[in-house]
Each structure stands twice: as structure tokens, then as C-alpha cells.
Amino acid sequence: MKLVVSDLDGTLFYKLNEVGDYTVETIQKLIDKNIEFAVASGRGKQGVDFLLNKLQRDVYLICNNGATIFDKEGNCIYEQVIPKELSIKILKTIRENGLFFSSFYNENFYHHKDDPEDYTNRRKTFKRNVLEKIEDTPPLNKIIITEDEETIISINKILREKYEKDVEITISDPKCIDIVPKNCSKGNGIKIITEILNIPIEETMAFGDGENDLDMLRKVGYPVVMENAQEILKKEIKNVALPNSEEGVAKYLEKYFNL
């Protein structure tokens, strides 16, 4: 294997926004052994920067489920958006069903003026924008909905019936839906990076736990799912790492690469 790619939440992070020292040291050893490493996340770049500060290594970033890709110097080398008019339609559908959204474009975070959630201590790494009316939304890299599992199943069905031909819709977590531009995925992000690095995708290892990881796990030569992964992944992928709470990615890498 010449490239390792990892999801963050539920995979590399042992809990929300926390990466273990053992994991950091293992990735550093991997990179120092001339194995390329990349992050593939539903997060925007602002939600990943703290990890880069800890790693003290230059890595590729696949962000917003593949809607944005950054090179080792932090330059955006690929970007796709949901067009403004389509973004408006999707946001209106979400509101018509009594739900709220978080939407993103680059460093900007947008939410509806009636959203009761307190964002004072959330999304702090993004520039907050309140939408007085939905028509004010710009083109977007990503839209997310966080709700209870039953509501997520219901709104997922509604959104897929209306927009599945126009955007990518995945349940990244049982309580979260991600909506990104059509044909954007972590798998396509890996394809772009492997072409830049001239590495066969068959010589790539990837780790994931959610439905939004499935495309990349199907594309790479060596897919690994977490023990805590959604059942849809565990039914298909046979290589299993210990759960994220036990820093399973690091333990798998240490054993596989003899670090």
C-alpha cells in the first residue's frame, strides 16, 4: 500500500473533535516511512485544521464528502457546488417539513433566522451567516440535517424522491444527513489524488464507518471498516478495525505496516 486515507468522525477521532496522541504518532511514523496519508471527511477544511496542527505533516484533504479537495500546501485544487437555485429548492423542502439545516460554502456557515439552536459555541471555526430568507443563500458545498434517527429516515426518503438525480444524499451518521453536489464523493476524491500522486488506486487503503464512506471503500484496493461502523458497511467490507474509541485505525496501521 502506498496511500492511506481515513475518515475522521467515528473513525480516526476516538470521540468528537478528539484525536489520540497514539494515533497522531502512528500517522507520523507512517508518513515518515514514505507512505502517503490523506483525510477524507464530510467536514469543511476549517473543521480539519486542528488535526493538521497536531500532525505537523503535510497531507491531502478531501473535504465536504469530496466537494472540495486541498493539496499538501492547503491550496484548493478541486471544488464543486450545489447551484444557487437548487440549493434554495432543497432548503425550502427541509423547512417545509419543519426541520432546520446547516449549510456551507468555503469558510461560511449559513442557517435560517428562525433556527432555535444556539450556535454561540458551535461552528466556531466558520464565519456565521443568518439567512433572513432562504432566497439569500449562495451556491453551497454542503447541506446537513441533524435530527433523531426516525426523523432522519423520514426526511431522507423525501429528499431522495425529489433530488436524488441532482445531488448526492448520504446518511453519514444515524442522526445526520449530508447533501453535496452531484458526483462528489470521497471515492472520487481519492481517484483525483491517486492520479496526482501517480499511485494506483489498488494500492490505496481506506478506513470508514458511515454510509458516506462506502463509495471510497468500494473503490480502493484495501478497504477497512470500523467495528463501530454502520451495518451497511460491515455487511460488505470484511476487513475490520477495532472501534474508534480504542484508536482502531492506529492499531491497524501499526500492525499492517510494522510501524
Image (cartoon, helix red, strand yellow):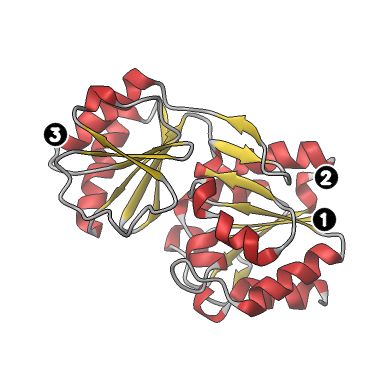
Q: Where is residue 259 in the image (x, y as percent from the top left)?
A: 81, 76
Left or right: 198 as drawn, with respect to 235:
right
The amino acid sitting under disc 3 is Glu
Of pointers 2 and 3, the one earlier in the residue sequence: 3
Closest to the observer: 214 or 96?
Answer: 96
Hey, which quadrant is residue 163 in on the image?
top left
Give the residue at mark 2. Answer: 199
- Residue under the point 66% across and 79% down: 22
Cα distance between the residues tagged 2 and 3: 46 Å
The amino acid sitting under disc 1 is Lys
Q: Using the image, determine if residue 192 lies above or below residue 259.
A: above
Does the CB distance between marks 2 and 1 fall below 8 Å? yes
Q: How crowded is mark 3: few (under 14 residues within 10 Å), some or many (20 or more)?
A: few
Give the residue at mark 3. Answer: 96
Give the residue at mark 1. Answer: 2
Of pointers 2 and 1, the one earlier in the residue sequence: 1
Q: Which residue ends up furthest to the top in the rendered image?
A: 85
Q: Using the image, determine if residue 62 lies above or below residue 231.
A: above
- Residue under the point 26% across and 50% down: 153
Hey, which quadrant is residue 144 in on the image?
top left
